Image: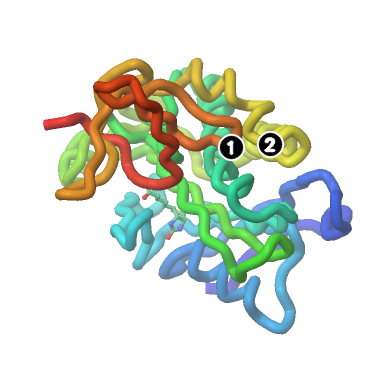
Amino acid sequence: MTPEPGPAVPDGDAPGAAIQLRAPVWHGELPSTNAYLLEQARSADPPPTGTVIAARRQTAGRGRYDRRWIAQPDRDLAVSLLLRPGVDFPRLASLPMAAALGVAAGLERAGVHASTKWPNDLLVGDRKLCGILSERAEGGPAGAVVLGIGLNVNMRADEAERIGQPATSILLETGLEHPLEEMLALLSPHLEAYLERWRVGGFAALRQEWTARCARLGQWVRIGEGPGARVGLLHGFGPDGELLLRGSSGTIQAIWSGDVGVPG
Ligand code: BTN
């Protein structure tokens, strides 16, 4: 399907330029907005920083750790942003956390209070509302990063039950349906503002807010699965967004990647 181009906006590719999100380009169907934008970013004619690609339907939506991302066609939001933040690991690790806070701030306007689940999910209670996937187009600090956001907007209860993990949507939380374009327009200024705060001040600028919204702070958690899983108290977050896990002996370990689960 031919995309509908958005209007031109000032160029944001100069090094050190503020993050500015462009008008979204909507597609009827894509395998994955992240895969599409990564391919574009690696092409000879890459799109400008701040490009926003949205799809009404994804046929191969993907999540972290090569999981599938299931969204309801025309009912849930699938959107990817192209950024060139000019930083490398470890600072880059907290970029999806900034995006999660931006989405959470926008969701407050839609009457939904979500908590953050490290490193990049939004939950209401124990139910997942939004997942974020950050992928690099190439290595090095100058490389492009694609930030994909999957938000359950109008997912119904029977659809949520078929996901295979506890899920919720804005519709289920508020009883209100939202056109996807409207929801993206509502979220965009908040996303932009949080990404810019992160660009200027790093995770340190967002740490307090992240911690205040964080699910399971002070609780026993399990990071990862199987024999390599670590169990401890969720103590807090370090200056670059790393999770601080407190073991039973009182030692604190910094963890840079993984999934937070409940010890079972
Ligand atoms: C996760 O929770 O594992 C992350 C899910 C990210 C899903 C979004 S939907 C838009 C973008 N395109 C994809 O294929 N994935 C991300």
Residue visible at 49% across and 28% down in the picture: 237
Does residue 136 sit above or below 166 in this rendering?
A: below
* Picture quadrant of residue 256: top left
Q: Which quadrant of the rendered structure holds the C terminus?
A: top left
Q: Residue furthest bottom?
A: 44
Q: Position of residue 2 (x, y in %)?
A: 58, 73
Q: What residue is disc 1 on?
A: 240
Q: x and y percent of residue 78 in the render?
A: 47, 52
| Labels 2 and 1: the sequence-earlier one | 2
Label 1 sits on what residue type? Asp
**For this view, does 86 lie left or right of residue 183?**
right
The residue nearer to you, when weighing 4 against 190, is 190
2 vs 1, front mark: 1
Residue plotted at (49% across, 58% down): 55
Element carrying mark 1: loop
Tell me which residue sits at (44%, 33%) in the image. Answer: 243
| Residue 70 vs residue 234, the one in the foreground | 234
Mark 1 crowd level (few <14, some 14–19, many ≥20, 10 Å Cα): some
Q: What amino acid does circle 2 point to?
A: Gly
Query: Residue 125: in sight, yes or no?
Result: no
- Residue 202, numbered circle: 2
Q: Is residue 62 visible?
A: yes
